Amino acid sequence: MEEIKDRDELAEEFKWNLGSIYRTDDQWEEEFAEIENQLPKFEDFQGRVLEDGDSLLEVLGSRDEIFRKADRLFYYARMRSDEDTRNQKYQSMVSRARGLYAKVESRFSFIKPEIQAASCEEIENLIDRNPALKKYEHYLDDVLRLKPHTRDAEIESLVAELGEVLDAPGEIYNYLTNADLEFPSVEDPEGEEVELTLSNFVNLLQKKTRSFRKEVYTKFFDRFADVGNTISTAYSNSVRKDNKLAKIKNYDSARERALDENNIPVEVYDNLLNVIEDNLDLLHRHLVLKEEALGCDDLKMWDIYAPLPSSDSPDIPYDRAKDYVLNAVEPLGDDYRNQLEEGLESRWIDVYETPGKRAGAYSGGSYDTQPFILMNYKGDISSLYTLAHELGHSMHSKLTSEHQPYVYSDYSIFVAEVASTLHEALLTEYLLEEISDEDFRLHLLDQFLETFRSVLYRQALFAHFEQEVHEKEEAGAGLTRDSLSELFADLKGSYYEPVEIDERIKREWMRIPHFYRAYYVFQYSTGISASLALARNILDGEDSASDNYLEALKSGSSDYPLEILRTAGVDMSQPEPIKSALSLYEKYLGEVEAVI
């Protein structure tokens, strides 16, 4: 079992370069004070947003400038805190940055209501008379589109001011699970004591010894039982917040409000769940295959993550992983590959797990910084694919920042998950072409099947769960620890029919942080569906497939997500991409069945 080193024991090359944002924390404090001092002067803009084109341009430009600084402050504080979630200083800085961000949002909350007081024709005339406003054309169109759901300036300001409070359930959950919740240790098959963490839980469930997997599973979910009431209270309040905000914003449901932010019809969500739940037989077939490969008479929930191959994952040192990813993205062109290589050598990535470090992985940073990636690299195939995944996000951010103004830099997750999973698809194709070792290839196929199960099916299950939870709360049903667990168990039983639903798996919803971002998870499922279709186009050498895809990455949020993906070459308003992805899943299932 790989030793978890203290942070100061790691070489600098394995730690992200947050000093490129602020050399010192004092510099962060100076910019924080600068923003606070600047805020009062923006009161003068209120009431004159549409005075003329110059006034509108000045207001929007000033807003962008202050938000760029606030973004930079927040991401620096959050990433410092994520290095060690126990650090009180950085916890405080995150809280202060959130509070300042809420103040900034409140200060500029008058902009949208004043714009929405105008007609489309009036806005078009302003743009015609002042061509510099052209870059805000899509933004202005989006603001006018949301007019029925924007309240007057006073209410919008109040909601913005409450932003920090409204985010409290998610923050409570984050610090509870990452900082305060301590898990017991287990003795691994090699006889070493290993402390369970959120980060290593799934990795440990991939071990070959079944009794060890059961012990890990049991102790992990028993620990969640100790805090179940706290988590259920946090989540029920998060759901209640979602539903209340939907009413405030004149939406029929929290789901409609969440999807409308990116102009995505709810039919896209329904389409996903309908197609997936009509094809649960493929998932059941995968589970039966796993049962046969593991030699189990009855597959249990602690067996789900166990790999199909009888051998352990091939050891993949970090340097080799970087080379694999660089070679895999070559179909996207030399310039793309070179930019990615430069990023890997520029300390984008915080590579290894350290005590107190936030679990999991993500790509972060702001418009004015280089991309940053938090990882907990384990030297296995799963870590290799996580690296490829997060680098996809980072390259998306880099290309967007280089080709779009700040106003379009915050692209939708609906598009973002395509960039990350396309990297994974290219990596799978590259390695299956290059690797001749049958055991390694079986691990690759297993990695694909597991990714598909966990990203398409599992996230669809989560999407169904949060939809039902929000609907039950809206209907007046109380959300308790037991009711949430029973609802989750019913869905888990349907999706994972060949596997026994035990008492502990009913608590799985408690370990999912994404539920605190309402209606977020379905985009993982749509993302992998779109990415597999696009990867196939690129690898088949279809005319302009690679160029069209890169243009989509450069678009940021300068158009609506569905339109950006149509530019890339896929239409997610239709069921075909999802069905196509399921066909590939079935194909690889057949190949592994033949080997097993």
Image (cartoon, rainbow, N blue to C red):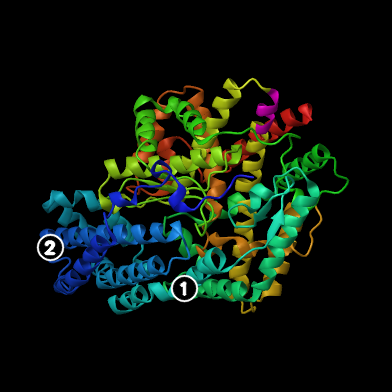
| Left or right: 9 in relation to 557 | right
Q: Residue 344: say if magenta.
A: no
Q: Where residue 140 sits in the image (x, y, percent)?
A: 27, 57
The amino acid type, in three-letter code, at marker 2 is Ser
Can you tell which of label 1 and label 2 is closer to the viewer? Answer: 1
- Asked if one can make out residue 161 in the rendered structure from this viewpoint, the answer is yes
Q: In which quarter of the image is residue 141?
A: bottom left
Mark 1–mark 2 Cα distance, whole angstroms, equals: 36 Å
- Position above or below: 412 against 111: above
Task: For the C terminus, give its image quadrant.
Answer: top right
Secondary-structure class at tag 1: helix
- Asked if one can make out residue 301 in the rendered structure from this viewpoint, the answer is no
Toward the viewer: 276 or 329? Answer: 329
Q: Where residue 70 sits in the image (x, y, percent)?
A: 28, 62
- Pointer 1 or 2: first along the chain: 2
Residue range (magenta):
438-443
Toward the viewer: 95 or 586? Answer: 95
Q: Do labels 1 and 2 touch, CB within 8 Å?
A: no
Q: Mark 2 points at which residue?
A: 55
The amino acid type, in three-letter code, at marker 1 is Ala
Q: Where residue 588 sits in the image (x, y, percent)?
A: 68, 31
Q: Name the residue under label 1.
A: 168
| Left or right: 5 in relation to 341 | right
Magenta part mainly helix, strand or loop?
A: helix
Toward the viewer: 506 or 140? Answer: 506
